[in-house]
Amino acid sequence: MFLYNLHLAWLSIKRTPVLSALMVSAIAIGIAICMTIITVYKLMANDPIPHKSNIIFTQTIDLRSASPDDDPNGPDHMSYQDAQNLLKSDIPSKISVHYQTVAVIKSEDESVRPFRSRVRPVTADFFSLFETPFLFGNQWTADDEDSLQQVVVISRALNLRLFGGINSIGQQIQVAGRFYKIVGVLDDWTPTPRFFELDGGAFSETEGAFIPFSLVPALELRKSGGSTVCHASETKEGWQGFLTDECTWLHMWVQLDTQEQQEQWKEHLDNYVKQQKELGRFPRELNNRLHSVMQWLEFKRVVNNDYIMLLGLAFMFLGVCLFNTVGLMLSQSLRRRGEVSVRRALGGSKLTLFYQHMVEASVIGLAGGALGLVLAQAGLAGVRSLYRGFDLLTQMNWQLIAITFGLSILSSLLAGLLPTWRICQLAPAQYLKTQ
Amino acid sequence: MLTLKKVSKSFRTDLVETHALRSLDLTVDEGEFVAVTGPSGSGKTTFLNIAGLLETFTSGQLILDGEDVSNLSDRQRSIIRNQKIGFIFQGFNLIPDLNLYENVEVPLRYRGIKKAERKERIENALENVGLIGRMKHIPSQLSGGQQQRVAIARALAGEPKLLLADEPTGNLDSLMARQVIELMENINDTGTTIVMVTHDAELAHRAHRNIHIMDGEAVDMEQVLSMSQHQRASKTASA
C-alpha cells in the first residue's frame, strides 16, 4: 500500500504542479534557514571530545594582586612558574601545558620556500590527553623531553606541504632557525570547538608543528594570539625574567579519571596556593576553579546568546513557512473532495485515506528537504563569505543532512495534519452527487 | 438482501428541521432489480446513500445481507461497502488521474487482493464492458457512455452482492443509456441485486419492481396512479 500511495502522491503532485511547487518551496525555504543556523549552532555547541569531556579539566588559579573591582573570575591562563610547579604532581593521569607561537619553518628541500606557521610547544602528554590521531610515527617520549631533544610532530597539512604527504619520520625541518627531527605526523585533527585553546578563536585550524615544551626556556618563542597578562607592578627584563614573572599566558589541562582524583587535585591546587601565599604570592583569597571541557566552553561563552536567539528566530520562520504550507494544502484538499468521496464510497476508510494523504505530505516534505539542503548549502556558503573563521562551522555532516530530511518530513506531516484530518471528515455522499 | 425498518433521516439547522426520510419501510429481495422513483427532493438519493452506508440515519434499522448494519463504526461500514456494495453514479465519478485499469483497481486495493488476482478481475471486468483494449486510457479520453461502463466495471470487479445506481443514465444520450441499462440487466441476470434511482419512467419499467418515494415515504404505485387520475378528473369536472 505504501508504494501505491507513493504513486498516488506523484500523480497528485503532477496534477497540481504550481501548488505543489509552492508547497515544496515554502518548506524548502524554512528548512534552509533553519538548517543554516542549526549547522552553525550544532557545531558551536558540539562536545569536541565526547568520550572523555567529563574527565579532562582546565583550572584557573588567581594570582592577581588585590583589587576589589576586578572580575571575580581569575585569569584564564597560568604563569610559567606555576605551570612548572604543578607539572610535577603525579595526581592527574595526564597533564599538559602548552601555548601557541608563530615561527618560520623551512625544510631541507630548497625548492620549498620558508614560511611562517603556527607552532605549539606542548608537554608530551598533550597527544595522549587529547587523543590526537597519528598518520605516521608517534609522539616524543618523556626521555626526549627531559633530555631536551629537538623533535617535532607535524600536522598532515604541513607534511603534505613539505614532503608531498609521504612518510617523513626521521626527516628534519627547521623551526625558528633550529633543526628538529620529525617523530610523528598527525592525521587530520580539528576538534570543534578547539577547546584546548580558545585564544586564537574557538573554530580555527590546529597548528602545523608541535615541539617539546621543555625547550621553551632556550627558545624564546613568545606567545602569539590571545592574552598575556602580567599581574605584578614591576616586570623583569628579558625572556628568563618573563618566565619567572607573575605573567599568565599558558594553558594547562589535566586528566582526572575518578572523583577521588578530582578531589585530590582540587586539594592539591588549594595547598599549592596556600604554600605560595607563605612565599608572598597570591594576595587574594583562594579562588581556584576546575572546569571540565563543556563547563569551560560554557564559561567562555563559545555559544553566545545571539546565536541562541537566532536559532529561535529560525524556528519561528520555519513555523511561518509551515503555516503557508498548511494554507496551500487546505486549498489543495478542497479540490480533492470529490476524489476522496469516491474513494470512501469504494471502501476506503478514514484511516486509509489519512495514510494516503500523509504519505503525500511526506513526499512534499522530502522534496522540500532536498531543495532545502541545496539552499542551506548556499546559506552556509554565504556565512563563510561573510565571516572569517567559520569554515569549520559551515560544513554539513551526514548527521545534519539526516536532521534536514527528518525536520522537513516532520514539518510537512505537521502541515498536512489539519488538511488531511479535515478531508477525512467529509461526508462522502455530499460530493458524490455534485461531482 | 436489503431491509429498511422505519428508517428516518432528518437534517437539523438552528431554524428548521428537514425530514428527508420518514419511517421508511422497504425490502429488496436477493436477485431483484428494483427501480426507485419519485420527484426531486423526495428522498431517493438519501435512501440510496443510507442503503450504501454512505450516510447515517436518525432512527430505524438497516439490515444488509442478513446483518444489522445500523450502528457500525466507520471502518466496519467501509469494509462492508468495499466487499458487498457496488456504486454507479450519474456523474461516473472516475478518478481523473488514474487510467481505466487503475480506476477499476481502487476497490480491489482497499480489499487487499493480491496483484495477480487483481489483474485477472480487472481484465475480466473491462472485458465485460467492452473496454479491455483501452485500459491504459484516462477517463477524459473516453465518451460519457464509455466512462459509465468503466464505472460499472469498477463496481463489478469487486463482485458485489448489491449494486446501487443513482441516475446511471442521467448524463447519457438515449443510445448510450440503452447500452448501459442492457449491461445492468445482464449483471442482474448473474444474480446481483440492483437498486436503481431514476427519473426515467421507461428505465423504471425495465426493472422487476418499482418503489415510489414521496416526501420521504415509500408509497404504493397504484395509490399514486389513482390519486393522479382523481386529480385529473376533478380538474376536468371543474373546467
Image: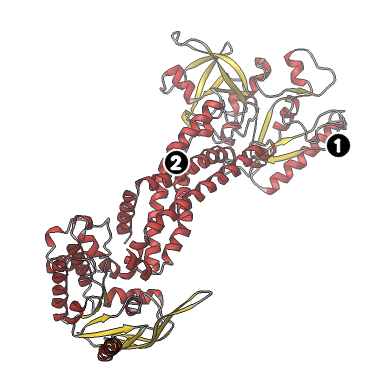
Please determine whether, in this image, residue B73 is positioned above or below residue A219: below
Which residue in the structure is indicated by mark 2? A372
Front residue of A189/A309: it is A309
Q: CA distance from mark 2 to mark 1?
A: 55 Å
Task: Establish if B34 lies above or below A162.
Answer: below
Residue A278 falls in which quadrant of the image?
top right
Q: Residue at x 52, y 38 (%)?
A: A36
Count all numbered tags in the image, as a single digit. 2
Residue linked to disc 1: A285
Give left or right: position of B161 versus A275: left
* Circle 2 SS class: helix
| Percent coordinates x, y for residue B75 in the rendering | 38, 74
Q: Nearer the viewer, residue B14 or A224?
A: B14
In the rendered view, how is the structure colored? secondary structure
Going by the picture, which residue comes out furthest to the top? Answer: A110
Mark 2 near mark 1, Cβ–Cβ under 8 Å? no
Residue B199 in the image, given as x and y percentages of width and height: 25, 76
Q: Quadrant of residue B42?
A: bottom left
Q: For mark 2, does the 10 Å Cα neighbourhood hold few (<14), some (14 to 19), or many (20 or more) residues? A: many
Mark 1 surroundings: few (<14), some (14-19) or many (≥20) residues within 10 A: few
Q: Position of residue A386 (x, y in %)?
A: 55, 26
| Lower sequence index among marks 2 and 1 | 1
Residue B202 is labelled as none
Chain name for mark 2: A
Q: Amino acid at mark 1?
A: Glu
Give the quarter of the image for residue B68.
bottom left
x 41%, y 84%: residue? B8
